[in-house]
Amino acid sequence: MRLKNLQNVHARGKESPVNAFYLSLSDLMTLLCVFFAVLVGMSRIDVGSFEKMKSSVTGSSKGTLVELAKDLEKVSAGQKGVSVHLGEDGVHLDFETAALFDTGSAALRAGSLEPMSGLLKRILATKYSIDVEGHTDDVPLYRKEKMHDGDEIETNWTLSGRRASSVVNWLVAFGYGESRLRIIGYGSTRGKVDVGPLSGAKLEAARSENRRVSMLIR
């Protein structure tokens, strides 16, 4: 009886080739699952966040959005009506609409983007895609405009899209490839400043800041 038990213990201690194969396969599948989990996690990282991380790991920001944002900040220093910041989704270049358009208009003022040519040439030299976003303030807009083919309803949505379209047309004439550009009209849905608690001069200043056309370089 004791001899039989010893034989059983010895048998359990010896690992068969089949069991060794399944253990190796199990390890491989675990590694593959971890690898694909890392890939999925990386795919959810916004380009701005990824390039910040890349710069910190490599110690160099050359050829990244981090470098582009720094260059644009230098070029735009002292210019009124324009601001630059690097967000998680890319570089944001914001133009105040007061510098580009008359109130309620989507027609670019003549020469209004010429002072920005240094900024725009720097972006043109990259291969990044660009979203041109129109933003209005929260003041309701609802009017009819006479168009060549009939009346057209104008709202904050349509005004923001038409302003973004005007800037895109200017960029194409400036030399930007059409495939790099996308037009987006956000209306008043993405204000930079929450106007809810504000009133008087502070409210007007916040609304002025919210009225903008943005270039998101990504």
Image (tube, rainbow, N blue to C red):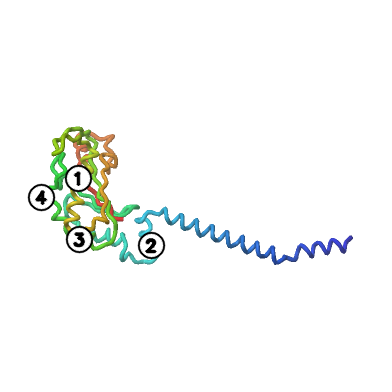
For residue 54, the mark is 2
Query: How packed is label 4: few (under 14 Cα within 10 Å), some, or many (20 or more)?
Result: few
**In this figure, which residue is indicated by the disc labeled 1?**
163
Residue 162 is drawn in which quadrant? Answer: top left
**Up/down of 95 relative to 189, above or below:** below
Residue 81 in the image: state x and y as whole percent: 18, 49
Residue at 31%, 55% (x, y): give it.
218
Query: How packed is label 3: few (under 14 Cα within 10 Å), some, or many (20 or more)?
Result: few
Kind of residue at badge 1: Arg
Kind of residue at badge 4: Ala
Query: How packed is label 1: few (under 14 Cα within 10 Å), some, or many (20 or more)?
Result: many
**In this figure, which residue is indicated by the disc labeled 3?**
121
**Inter-mark Cα distance, 2 to 1:** 35 Å
Q: Which of marks 3 and 4 is nearer the N terminus?
A: 4
**Inter-mark Cα distance, 3 to 4:** 19 Å
Kind of residue at badge 3: Lys
**Up/down of 74 relative to 97, above or below:** below
**Inter-mark Cα distance, 4 to 2:** 41 Å
Residue 147 in the image: state x and y as whole percent: 14, 38
Mark nearer the viewer, 3 or 1: 1
Marks 4 & 1, CB-CB < 8 Å contact: no
**Inter-mark Cα distance, 4 to 1:** 14 Å
**Inter-mark Cα distance, 3 to 2:** 25 Å
SS type, badge 4: loop
Mark nearer the viewer, 3 or 2: 3
